[in-house]
Amino acid sequence: MAEHYKPVKYKAWELNLEERFQEYHPPLSEREAVLEANRCLYCHDAPCMVACPTHIDIPTFIKKISTGNVKGSAKTILEANLLGATCSRVCPVEELCEGACVMKHDHKPIMIGRLQRYAMDYAAEKNIKFFQAGKANGYKVAVIGSGPAGLSCAGELAKLGFDVTCFEKKEMAGGLSTYGIVVFREPVEVSLAEVKRIEDLGVKVKTGVNVGVDIKFEDLIEQYDAVFIGMGMGNVPDLSIPGEDIPGVLDGLDFIEETKVKKLADIKAGSRVCVIGAGNTGIDCATIARRLGSERVTIVYRRSEAEMTAYHFEYQFALGEGVSFMFLTQPVEVVGNGKVEGLKCIRMDLGAPDKSGRRVPEPVKGSEFVMPCDMVIKAIGQKKHKNVVDALAKFGVKSENGYVLVDSETCRSAHPKIFAGGDCIRNKGEASTVAAVQDGKIAAAAIYKQLVGATSPNEKHIEPVLSPVK
Ligand SMILES: Cc1cc2nc3c(=O)[nH]c(=O)nc-3n(C[C@H](O)[C@H](O)[C@H](O)COP(=O)(O)OP(=O)(O)OC[C@H]3O[C@@H](n4cnc5c(N)ncnc54)[C@H](O)[C@@H]3O)c2cc1C
Ligand code: SF4
């Protein structure tokens, strides 16, 4: 039977630099995939399908692998999720599809993520094109941002016959899948191949265009029949502590991005690194630093292990990579003269719970200490696009805490032409790639219904509600 999510047997530091940044999970061989697929019970009303936010027909795609129809399997996946290759690598499957697998109780859950990757890799290797642009319906849609939300929305709309242009401010498309997901979980090529799949449907992806700076929002609203906002979130916010501007204090997302776009040998990591924050970004930065050769990497977190937002498997992974954790520790100053020499911290205690139910950390008087280090990486979440949200407010788009407010059934904002999805709307709940993909799908269906006038192309066509923008 195929190995089940066992950590790879090597110790990262025994490998050379390039090898340390290869994909962590090796692909399943054909034999392993067929054996694993044959374990599936093909449940009626399969709970895994309900647990997958994009509701992929998991039993069917697995059945197709077991019968050797890998092409058909890939088509089943892509029908529900155009970013199936990325999701197969990054989805927190323990919390989603595999967490719901009935085999979990007596045996091990079916390796849904890795089987999905097997089918997606097969389709990519063979360069199989499953879908084509739908018959042109005369409507134009602008998509802001080419991350999972934007690409999913753009691809689904193109399949329905819309003329779609996607504007992306970065040099490469793909959003965090290209720039932010650590390379040993998702190589850049996988993300770019997915972008190409969307372009093959006729979507025009214009990179290097910052909407709001290079093009005005009002022009998009005027020139297009609908606008989808999939702008994600910004960089890491400031710590607002003294010494933050000393060279050697890095933004965690910039640090991860370097490993995705630069030669690994050209990236410098300190020998003693402090990472501030214990979420996904903190774990990724810490494991990257270890794999780049840092001798000591410590994650500093002001709350306790129970409150950290990283998944349990990520925590275990980081521990296995030799990362240390300092809980109940709050950084108060970066110490150094022209370069980082240490991180001054204070011990914390947990007080009464706040409104969210999490106990509030409180400083312990007189407990300051300096942890020697030569690099500090900030990984305390992502900034909101407050300027964009403010700019959209004048068109009537409402927001809450810096997130765009939309109707959850349509992803439509308070402006009838403007839709949004992905991280920029996720005020509550877990922000994830697969959730962003589903938002894109929901918005595409709602745009179709609003403009063309039916809920799906198979339904009886009724007259358009709005006329196309000339
Ligand atoms: C370090 C890190 C690790 C993560 N790991 C995982 C994981 O393992 N599994 C998982 O499911 N999720 C993970 N996530 C979360 C996941 O990456 C996001 O939920 C997902 O990428 C959201 O997709 P999105 O399309 O909303 O936004 P993004 O992927 O952020 O894409 C938004 C795009 O919009 C562009 N943009 C922004 N403003 C403008 C503008 N004005 N004009 C033009 N373009 C613009 C941006 O450049 C970007 O390309 C991780 C996130 C981070 C930060
Ligand atoms: S998209 Fe993600 S959650 Fe859905 S079946 Fe695939 S791996 Fe599981």
Image: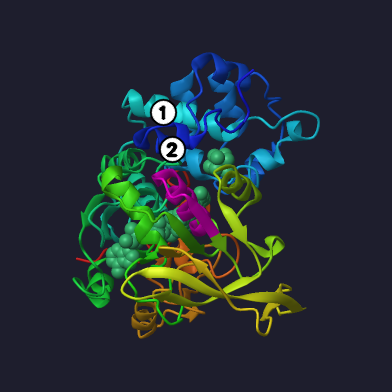
Marks 1 and 2 close (CB-CB < 8 Å): yes
Residue that badge 1 annotates:
121
- Identify which residue is drawn at 65% across, 79% down: 367
Which percent across, then down, holds residue 299? Answer: 55, 60
For the C terminus, give its image quadrant.
bottom left
- Helix, strand or loop for the magenta stretch, by majority: helix
**Mark 1, other Cα within 10 Å: few <14 / some 14–19 / many ≥20:** some
Closest to the observer: 297 or 190?
297
Q: Amino acid at mark 2?
A: Ala
Q: Is residue 446 visible?
A: no
Residue that badge 2 annotates:
85
Which percent across, then down, holds residue 334? Answer: 44, 75
- Under circle 2, the secondary element is helix
The residue range painted magenta reads: 281-298
- Under circle 1, the secondary element is helix
Does the residue tagged 1 have its C-beta within 8 Å of any atom of ligand 2? no
Q: How many marks?
A: 2
For the N terminus, give its image quadrant.
top right
